[in-house]
Amino acid sequence: MGRIGIYGGTFNPPHRGHILAVQEFARQLNLDRVLMIPASVPPHKALPAGSPDAETRLRLCRLAAEGLPFVEVSDLELSRSGKSYTAVTVQELHRLYPEDELVLLMGTDMFLTFDQWREPKTIASLASLAMAHREKPDKKEREAIADQKKKLRRKYGARVTVLENDILELSSSTVRQLLAFGAGKTLLPPAVRDEIFRLGLYRTGERFRNLPFDALKAASLSLHKPKRVPHAIGCCETAQALAERWGESVEDAARAGILHDVTKVLDGPEQLILCEEYGILLDDFYRRNDRLLHAVTGAAVAARLFGESEKIADAIRWHTTGKPDMTPFEKIIYLADMIEPNRAFPGVEELRKLAMKDLDRAMLVTLERSVEYVEEGGNLLHPDSVHALEWQREHMEQPCSAETINEVNE
Ligand SMILES: [Fe+2]
Ligand SMILES: [Fe+2]
């Protein structure tokens, strides 16, 4: 009699987090083997658009399992028609391996929602349950897990093991996002990574370089969170208007505007992974304040993924903090980001008029306002913003302050 772990999931794509989890399960539970079972149509979630078909995910799983002799990839759920219910799988495995002990392996989320699965009692009668943490649990989560363990034992007679495991906080959606930016390679087993790039899966085969504006706009917006799309379009259109007014390239302004927040979809840890894979060195400030990192990564993505000019990449680079001695084009992108039509803060209307009348004064007022805003919010101010403001103050013909705004209205 052996102990068999059942490790199901969408594996879209299988990544290093899955491999680490499977190794931890096998080691801590003394499993003789683990069946890795990609789901066909998962009952809990629909696969995101553009996901590879089931056969391809199965192949990626086989590549991920190379070098793990105790892992066997099974097409049990893929070869069955209809949805992948765990209860059906466990019953089938029990029939196939009547002598063996089955252990159903899962992460925290699945464990805490076990009651909502189909036929939890059947599952618990045929397999014991083992849970590994997906992220470092806080006190509240530990309590919820302990409660759930008791409840499942009482309700279904479930035998539950909770692992204290090594954690690699990583989700498939993070991997997919990073792949779209040409990064994420370090998060995948090498054979999986090579196959993804060979087939151009998860947007890795998409051509982003030197696109005409309409295609660039579509590509950039498709990488945004939907709620941030109006801001990107607003910034793009405002940048065009300012470029027209101040004799800069309207086309370049549009390109910089539509791309300026392109990596904002990535959270802090993902931003850091992108920096690492792009070879971007960061100072301590950026490491601790990932809110500003999207300007750094956005510039790198604009230049390297989209093949945009240095001028456009630089304007994106400085759109959050500003810096001393900015070019008029950089000022335009900085201001467009602040005053585009979706922005609403006291004085924004006056600032819009000022930007069309006096670019440098608008810069000064905006820098003053954002320095104030950051300080009021209790956030750390980046030294670049301080230097930008000092420089702008020194280089104005007439010193001015927020009152300037009122003059414009008169
Ligand atoms: Fe931004
Ligand atoms: Fe922005």
Image: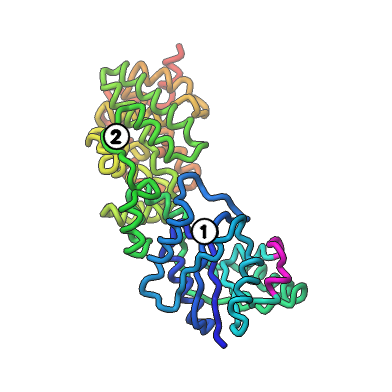
- Looking at the rendered image, the quarter that the C terminus falls into is top left
In this picture, residue 319 sits left or right of residue 230:
left
Q: Where is residue 179? Give x, y as percent.
A: 37, 51
The residue shown at (34%, 30%) is 333
Residue at left offset 48%, top offset 36%: 228
Where in the figure is residue 66, as x and y percent of width and height? Answer: 37, 71
Element type at mark 2: helix
Of helix, strand and loop, which one carries label 1?
loop
Residue at 59%, 66% (x, y): give it. 108
Q: Give the colouring mode of the picture.
A: rainbow
The numbered mark, 2 or 1, whose residue comes first in the sequence reads 1
Kindly identify which numbered label has been placed on residue 10. Answer: 1
What amino acid type should be assigned to the residue bearing mark 2? Ala
Q: Residue furthest right?
A: 155
119 inside magenta stretch:
yes
The residue range painted magenta reads 115-124
Q: Which residue is mark 2?
A: 315
Query: Which quadrant of the figure has residue 208?
Result: top left
Which quarter of the figure has residue 381?
top left
User: Quick check: 218 left or right of 299?
Assistant: right
Position of residue 118 relative to residue 263, above or below, is below
